[in-house]
Amino acid sequence: MSTSGELLSRWGSGLLKAARNAAGPFLCWISTCCSSGTSSNIFLTCGGSCKSFSLSISLIIVVAVCVLLRSILAAAMDAKTSASTSPLSKIDKSAYCDVESLNINGQEIRVRRPIEPQPAGTVQLPAQFTGDVFFVRYENLASLTKRATLVQLCKDYQLSSAGNRDVLRERIEGFSENPIQWQNLLYGATRSHRGQRTVSDGKIAKPPKNSLESKKVSKLKRSTIRRNELMGLPLNTPVHATIFGTERSKDRRTLEDKMNFVRLAEEFCKTHPYVPLEEIRRRTAVSEEAKKRADPTTMLSEYAQSTNMQLSNIAMIIGELAGRLSPNLSLFPSSMIIHPRPSQLAILASAAGSTNTEMVSVDGSRPSAISVSPSSSMVELSPVADICRTASSLALGLPRSSAALVPAASNDDVIMADADADADMSNRVGCKLATTTSEDPLYTIKLGYGQILQFRYSEIPNPALQISFSDNIARLGRVWDDEADGNDVHAEMKWDPADCANLLSINGTPVALRYWCDVYKGKKDRRWTLLKGTWTEWKVLVNVIPPFRPGD
């Protein structure tokens, strides 16, 4: 259906053509008469002055009508041109070709071009977006001579409007050559069952007849007006305004974006595989067990438990030997029979710890009887037999070297130990060991080159507080670090273990000054409190002054 502008244009063109055909011969006759100089003949021919006056009036009216029709025709043509230029104009889909798919950089764009071929010197611009298809129109930028028209066209397509006419034309041409940018005019939307909607100030509303004039400038927020100024849009453009209608609930991601997301998900699954809950619990249990084993307190408790078990076994052996040798005690004087003391039990514990043979089971059960194989006095005994002989020699008050004189038992002899006596002795020894362990704990520090030093609290000597390096800075370097013995260290700064032993030595091992913090700190006494300030000054002095090197 033709619009009113097109009908007015056709009617004006026909009327102007008829007027020209009717007034053409008359105007030609007037011009001929005027050129021949016989203007007076006009009045004679027309029948006098009255006739000439009426003819003149008729001529003026005809000319006025022609000028008016020409103006109407020009206005109609301008309206038609502006209607074809506006991207919001209605489009006759029958005047377009079938849908054409364009694959640009992996992205698919569907367009429909007009049936008529593209005129020379024109560019392709999107006119409407319907059903995932862009309708293309041709625009002759050379015919747009006014900058205001080019600026308005740039604003319609959300392009920058800065620059002269040549810059604006180049910007529009670049936009037309890259259909991927056409998608920037579209906005994602939702609720497709409600039809097409526009989002304005965060609210979904029906699209007005003219989306660019939906609100006045005075009613918009200042931030929206400032945004429109920065983006080169009309000041009355609302938020999320678009020149196209949008469809709801449509995925606007390109194929490349989807493939990148899938690739990222696959890489994440490879680096973070699924671990079952049972496996997580097992790993947690293993980690907790490793932490417990690495804890010095746990190691010390296990060591104490193992020592208690060994002492219990030794006490059992002593009881069995005492029961076996009781018939033969009359052969020895009473002065030679000496009961074992706690110090001798400690010797037995050290002897038991030096053997590699496990004497008792893990659950602490002891054998009900011990059978010793017959052997001569020169036969080497097993570790258990050696401990038995040592225990018997201590029970009789003999030196350890005389343990070989104790006769060995035969296979027929079976010794039963007194369970009550063994349990009582084991309890006494265990209580003594627990008391000693709690009062005198064991500490471990790491010296230079990975050397491990173990010592008890009672073995820590008091530090020498009257130490001064003010008159001999090189001595501080000799006693500070036990790893400063390389060739790159000055001879006066090399590690001197003898001098360091004069300051602090534990179990015969000289301890450098840098480890004094590990030795004295955390012992719940005042020794580190008195030593902390001086030791910190030494540390700062060593770190600030560069070490002496050969050639300095």
Image (cartoon, helix red, strand yellow):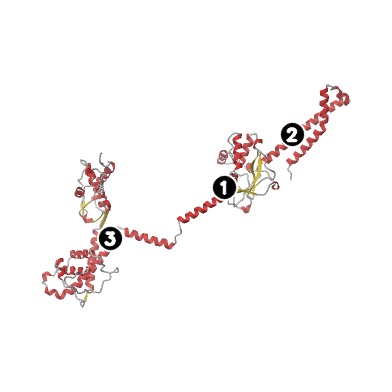
Whether residue 524 sits left or right of residue 243 in the image: it is left
Q: Tell me: residue 84, above or below residue 428.
A: above
Q: Secondary structure at mark 3?
A: helix
Q: Which mark is residue 56?
A: none
How crowded pointer 3 is (Cα within 10 Å; few <14, some 14-19, many 20+) is rated as some
Q: How many marks?
A: 3
At label 2, which amino acid type do we have? Ser
Say which of 178 and 441 sits in front.
Answer: 178
| Circle nearer the N terminus (2, 3) | 2
What residue is drawn where x is 81% and y is 34%?
Answer: 21
Q: Residue 136's spot in the image, x, y percent? A: 65, 44
At label 3, which amino acid type do we have? Leu
Q: Secondary structure at mark 2?
A: helix
Q: Residue 501's spot in the image, x, y percent? A: 20, 50
The residue where tag 1 is placed is 105
Q: Quadrant of the N terminus?
A: top right
Q: CA distance from mark 1 to mark 3?
A: 69 Å
